[in-house]
Amino acid sequence: MDDLLRFRKEFPILESSVYLVSNSLGAMPRAAADRLAEYARDWSTRGVRAWEERWWDMPVALGDEIAPLINAAPGTIAMVPNVTIAHAAILSSLDYTAPRDTIVMTGLDFPSVRYVYDQLAQRLGARIRVVESPDGLAIDEDALCAAIDERTRLVCISDVFFRSAYVLDIERIARHAHAAGALIATDAYHSVGVLPVDVAASGVDWLTGGVLKWLCGGPGGAFVYASPALDDSVRPGFTGWQAHRSPFAFAGDMDYADGAWRWLNGTPPIPALYAAMEGPRLIKAAGIRAIREKSSRQTRRIIALADERGWAVRAPREDRRRGGTVAIDVPNGLAVKRALAAENIVTDFRPGAGLRVAPHFYTTDDEIGAAISAIDRLLATEGWRDYAGRTSVVT
């Protein structure tokens, strides 16, 4: 018996699709439509009064909904439109004066985060030190720790890599960074909602993530946790009026608000926050440890089925090192992915990784078997050929 399957009825897309792509976009909760209708009703009936009655507090109030999923205290998480903006704020909050002028990252971090660091760091006087992967799958943690030294100001790394789902030991890396006098920011987009995450235990200074994927909250809802241990000298240069202590005074000088509020910027995307409410609540109701146990079991099965067929697996074999996704190097993977989608079996494909299969707490074991059987048939009959050579921005 799989007790988590009681949540399937909360996700309409599961009635028509085998949905194995929660690593990219989580299934929409049925109640999210009600919350969006609530937004429309608030706007249409309350107008500008909705700001005072609810909207203004939503970026931090929704952060408090997410806080238990990462063992964070209330008032330490702010919602922002995306993780790139979150990291622009983090990057801009520090000075990079020699000898503390180095930011340590890895070659497997999500490109959008790397872009903002690469483009802004030099202008802020910082240099980037990148620890490369020897195999495209993992980062040698000894090499990563060795790169963190007396010149390091900030360590910015993913806790789970998006291509391979490799899980880093963040607690160990944070401990080493702090011993070296550095701060650490983790991008947890591929962990929160499918793995246990504990900011108190790991001791990270910042953690960013979003509701788009495993939290089933849709686009436009990312978040940044800032440790209460950070002092008032940490002030984001990338900021806006909602981060001001007295925003409606419209003062000329910036006076930062306390806690999560200082990590906000301009006017928040209110519709996205309404859409984001229900997913985290369902994840909490399901229980993150139960979700993790099921995810480990189902991803083990995907690996075993791939091994039986001789498909290369681009994911860690150890449960503790594997997130919620298994990338398999299926022949003609992009065309196979598109052919599967035409049959309402939804996965995704990434160059250098292959076909990515991501079950979630609402996935049945039979759906995994059905997806693998469909791949077998498409390869045996060359049914993928009708989908080869097509171009698309979103693969």
Image (cartoon, rainbow, N blue to C red):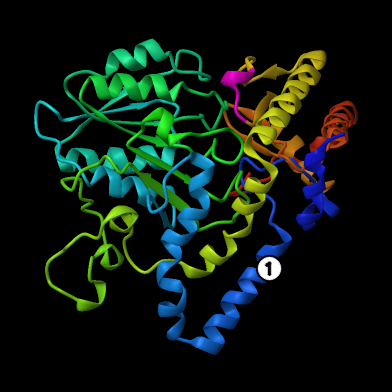
**Measured from the top left, where is residue 30 in percent x and y?**
73, 61
Residue 348 vs residue 384, the one in the foreground: 348
Query: On the image, which quarter does residue 145 sit in?
Result: top left
**Image point 58% across, 60% down: which residue?**
277
**Measured from the top left, where is residue 61 in percent x and y?**
46, 61
Residue 69 vs residue 169, the one in the foreground: 69
* 35 to the left or right of 128: right
* 394 inside magenta stretch: no
Give the amino acid type for the residue marked by disc 1 in the picture. Answer: Ala
How many C-alpha atoms fall within 10 Å of the one at disc 1: few (<14), some, or many (≥20)?
some
Residue 200 vs residue 376, the one in the foreground: 200
State the residue position of label 1.
Answer: 33
* 174 to the left or right of 46: left
Which part of the image, by quadrant, shows the C terminus?
top right
Magenta part of the chain: 319-323
Which part of the image, by quadrant, shows the N terminus?
top right
Mostly what secondary structure, the magenta segment? helix
In what element is the residue under mark 1?
helix
Q: Residue furthest front?
A: 73
**Measured from the top left, where is residue 275 in percent x and y?**
59, 63
